[in-house]
Amino acid sequence: MNRFNILIRKAKVSDMNHITNIYNYYVENTTSTFDIETVDVEDRLEWFKKFDNVNNPLFVSVIKDNVGNNENGNDKIIGYSGYMDFKTKMGYNVTRETTIYIDKDYHGYGVGSKLYSTLIKHAKENDRVYNLLGIVGGNNQNSIDFHEKMGFELIAHLPKVGYKFDEFQDTRYMQLFTNQ
């Protein structure tokens, strides 16, 4: 059982500072992303424009703290997940690429599963989405296992297509059909 009251909601512009901080940990310490240098909030604001919260949603996972006088209390964002267009050509408009990042201090609490379950449910209810692709960077077995647990299947392994931390990195494509 989780020790936190976790809420999943759609992301807002005001979440970009937290999202930037979560993402930058992965940039600096992992091959989950092939970004080499950290990003700033302005970069994440531009990135956020890819999400419309209808056909391309971005969800955040929040620890609810009802202390405070504003609408969000003292909520802490501990993860995010979304899907966006896989490619810009119209023939690809049935496929979405997923993204998911969890605050490093909240691994193992079910945050990722709750986020991805929400994302997959949204995709299954969206008749414009036929399948989701999780693109796993590096030799990230935890991410591969996670995607498999969520119903994704490994469909491609692209060896040495990236370069980070002074070595070549592989990429794997994992697919989930949502509307067959």
Image (cartoon, rainbow, N blue to C red):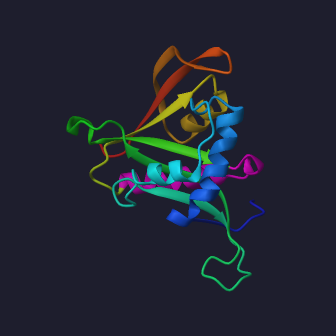
The magenta-colored residue range is: 103-124
Count of numbered labels shown in the rendering: 0
Q: Is residue 171 above or below residue 122?
A: above
Taking depth in this image into account, of 46 and 171 the one nearest to the observer is: 46
Image coordinates of residue 84 in percent, x first then y, are 39, 46
Q: Is residue 24 magenta?
A: no
Taking depth in this image into account, of 37 and 152 the one nearest to the observer is: 37
Quadrant location of the N terminus?
A: bottom right
Residue beneath the point at 51% across and 48% down: 43
Q: Is residue 39 left or right of residue 177?
A: right
Residue beneath the point at 62% across and 58% down: 17
Taking depth in this image into account, of 49 and 114 the one nearest to the observer is: 49
Residue beneath the point at 36% across and 38% down: 86
Most extreme residue toward the left is: 90
Image coordinates of residue 89 in percent, x first then y, are 24, 36
Q: Is residue 139 above or below residue 94?
A: above
Q: Is residue 104 magenta?
A: yes
Image coordinates of residue 144 in percent, x first then y, are 59, 30
Residue 12 appears in the rendering: no
Magenta segment's dominant SS is helix
Q: Is residue 71 left or right of residue 104?
A: left
Residue 70 appears in the rendering: yes
Image coordinates of residue 87 in percent, x first then y, are 32, 36
Q: Quadrant of residue 54?
A: bottom left
Q: Is residue 124 above or below residue 89?
A: below
Residue beneath the point at 68% across and 78% down: 73
Taking depth in this image into account, of 5 and 74 the one nearest to the observer is: 74
